[in-house]
């Protein structure tokens, strides 16, 4: 991160607006590109190509395995920098649900005959996993790491919750997939993460956090692009 990006800036022109709200307003177009991606829209309207779905499944399993050490490193940063008890419960809850997520991927892979041991990570996935690894560095502070964690989870939550909204024509086989991330419990988890980000960045928000938010959203768009074979 260069020196300009490291500079501390205020959250926005109106300090009563939480920082995440400021970013979402400012970067709405890019954010919608991730949460309303053609892959997601095709699940919602039932036109999804199942070979894309299977590609996504195999690649996301690899991603989630790299996501675990990143979440664990965020927990370590919390303990070192503030040890806020309620933040700890939120992150621990997230880690527990990642265990379920990994088992879910294994079950789905066997249902769709995807051999998880033979999946070759594609370029977009390799880059995203490298990015996650870079965030485990001790130079990345807790408020910045938790920002990335919130953004990563929020994109999936909003994408799949959109699939479930009224008027959907989700193929019956994919209903469970949409519910995995679109359910209310996962929504509440993402809201807790968002509240943590807003609290941590209330007084001063490093430009580095906003840059990371944008990079996460870009990686998510690339990940969906890869899933539809558009790389
Ligand atoms: C790429 C990606 N982003 C987010 C998630 C939700 N844990 C996921 N499984 N995969």
Image (cartoon, rainbow, N blue to C red):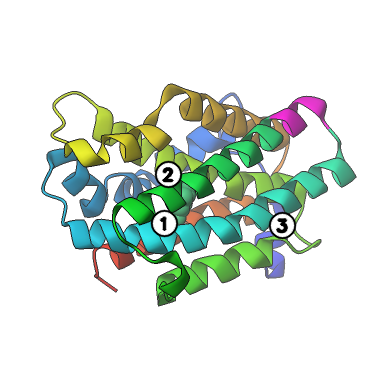
Earlier-in-chain disc, 3 versus 2:
3
Which image quadrant is residue 134 in? bottom right
Observer-nearest residue: 135 or 20? 135
* Disc 1 and disc 2 in contact, CB within 8 angstroms: yes
Q: What element carries label 1?
A: helix
Q: What stretch is highlighted in magenta?
A: 84-89
Which image quadrant is residue 116 in? bottom left
Q: Residue at x 74, y 58 (%)?
A: 140
Residue corresponding to mark 1: 220
Q: What element carries label 3?
A: loop
Residue corresponding to mark 3: 7
Q: Which residue is drawn at 81% across and 48% down?
A: 76
How far is mark 1 from mark 3, CA to CA? 26 Å
Earlier-in-chain disc, 1 versus 3:
3
**Predominant SS along the magenta part:** helix
* Disc 1 and disc 3 in contact, CB within 8 angstroms: no
Q: Residues within 10 Å of mark 2 (few under 14, many from 20)?
A: many
Residue 224, can we see it?
Answer: no
Q: Residue at x 49, y 33 (%)?
A: 21
Residue corresponding to mark 2: 155
Residue 128 spot, x, y in % from top left: 51, 66
Confirm whether the magenta stretch covers residue 166.
no
Residue 151 spot, x, y in % from top left: 52, 45
């Amino acid at each position: 991160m260069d020196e300009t990006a490291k500079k501390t800036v205020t959250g926005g022109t109106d300090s009563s607006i939480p920082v995440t709200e400021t970013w979402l307003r400012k970067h709405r177009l890019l954010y919608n590109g991730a949460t309303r991606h053609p892959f997601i829209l095709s699940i919602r309207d039932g036109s999804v190509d199942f070979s894309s779905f299977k590609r996504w499944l195999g690649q996301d399993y690899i991603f989630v395995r790299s996501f675990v050490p990143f979440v664990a490193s965020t927990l370590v940063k919390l303990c070192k920098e503030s040890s806020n008890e309620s933040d700890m419960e939120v992150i621990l809850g997230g880690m527990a649900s990642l265990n379920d997520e990994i088992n879910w991927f294994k079950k789905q892979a066997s249902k769709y005959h995807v051999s998880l041991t033979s999946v070759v990570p594609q370029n977009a996935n390799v880059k995203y996993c490298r990015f996650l690894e870079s965030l485990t560095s001790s130079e990345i502070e807790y408020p910045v790491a938790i920002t990335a964690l919130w953004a990563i989870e929020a994109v999936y939550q909003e994408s799949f919750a959109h699939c479930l909204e009224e008027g959907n024509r989700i193929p019956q086989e994919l209903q469970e997939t949409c519910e995995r991330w679109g359910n209310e419990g996962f929504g509440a988890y993402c809201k807790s993460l968002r509240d943590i980000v807003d609290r941590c960045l209330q007084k001063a928000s490093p430009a580095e956090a906003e840059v990371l938010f944008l990079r996460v959203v870009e990686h998510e768009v690339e990940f969906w692009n890869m899933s539809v074979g558009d790389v």
